[in-house]
Amino acid sequence: MADGKSGGTKSGEALLFLTDEQLRKGIEAMFFAYRGFTADPDRILEKHGYGRAHHRALHFISRAPGTNVNNLLGILGVTKQSLNRVLRTLIEDGLVESRVGVQDKRERHLYLTETGKVLEGEIAEVQRARMRAAYREAGHEAVSGFRQVLEAMMDPDQTAFFNALSGKED
Amino acid sequence: MADGKSGGTKSGEALLFLTDEQLRKGIEAMFFAYRGFTADPDRILEKHGYGRAHHRALHFISRAPGTNVNNLLGILGVTKQSLNRVLRTLIEDGLVESRVGVQDKRERHLYLTETGKVLEGEIAEVQRARMRAAYREAGHEAVSGFRQVLEAMMDPDQTAFFNALSGKED
DNA sequence: AGTTTAAGTCAGTGTTGTTGACATTCCAAG
DNA sequence: CTTGGAATGTCAACAACACTGACTTAAACT
């Protein structure tokens, strides 16, 4: 079962033969790539005294302006307290604006301020730059495969959030 | 620059047209997929009172038995103390064995004990299972592209570690 | 009026990361 | 041979960020 050769690859049959070794390589690739993926944003965030949690909030508020706290909690998959700590500092620092809901006054709708958009844009650009470079290096076919595998790797409820965020095209 | 349509996609020319929107989708896919990627191991680790740092140590010691602390530090990209805290509990709990170096007595060589191999194997299997399922769902071509993009996304020094860990084939 | 929902808060805890100081060992220059 | 520097690993104290659980406020629903 852990001899790295047989194991769970028996039921694969005709279509796809996957040794434990190949799977392990994929797992390690995921680990190292994710570090690269977060490296550039981390550098910028550090200069401002922020962490990844702040980036995630900025990103998804930018992506879904006017979203409420509950929705953001679902997307980020953290607790209220975790999100709130981050959100409070972002609001205090004037990067995020919280507006009381019109229809439902219990809700707070979140928006990036101009300052918030600047920082989010700066971080997004370096992250896009790396993604762009990786895509170009790997080529068109690879990009499609990359996305397919990633989507298949998500938990179903996460996939729901992912799809809900979809822009029109893609 | 942040209108999601133009921006840094100008120098793409013939080969690959990438809108900011497509890149953003890739970034979000990476975020959600990584959460799925770590979900199963996290569940097992939690039962034992361990975290991801413990898993990473177990994984790479299993991958490179007899490695010393310094090498592990390079692979994991954390500070000595971070690794050491984790390593100490794993040694105390009898999952990892630390042997003083023969040639250089400053070095400690790390090995999994039988107990350590059992836990590492259990975690590795659930992680492989998800990767296997994702690979099968996405298909052979996709797997190749997935790996290509991930490798291109790594920092060069991380790629070095990644390749150094390579098994014979693959 | 009573219940539920959305958001925010306070207190306590755990994991994981950091820096700084320290012990041991090796090695090479005087 | 000894002394001093470099490398390896350990320990202590601290910061960031996640978690649970209990509670408050306000608004909405029934």
Image (tube, coloured by chain):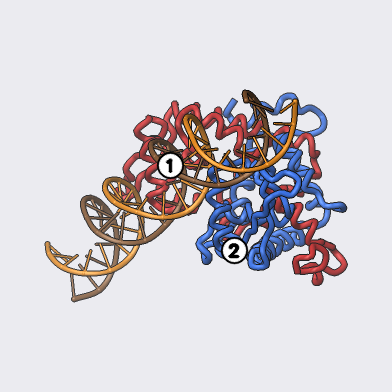
Chain colours: A blue, B red, C brown, D orange
Q: Is residue B169 visible?
A: no
Task: Specify whether A44 is left or right of B92.
Answer: right
Callout 2: residue from which chain? A
Callout 1: residue from which chain? B
Q: Amino acid at mark 1?
A: Gly
Q: Quadrant of residue C19?
A: bottom left
Task: Specify whether C6 is left or right of B91.
Answer: right
Q: Which residue is mark 1?
A: B66
Task: Name the spot of residue C8 as percent of width and height, x first.
Answer: 55, 47
Q: Residue at x 65, y 46 (%)?
A: A69
Seen in the picture, residue A68 relative to C26 is either above or below; the reply is: above
Q: Quadrant of residue D30?
A: top right
Q: Nearer the viewer, residue B97 or B93?
A: B93
Task: Name the spot of residue B147 as percent of width and height, x first.
Answer: 71, 48
Task: Name the spot of residue A17 as percent of width and height, x first.
Answer: 75, 33
Circle 1 SS class: loop
Task: Name the spot of residue B11 as percent of width and height, x first.
Answer: 80, 71
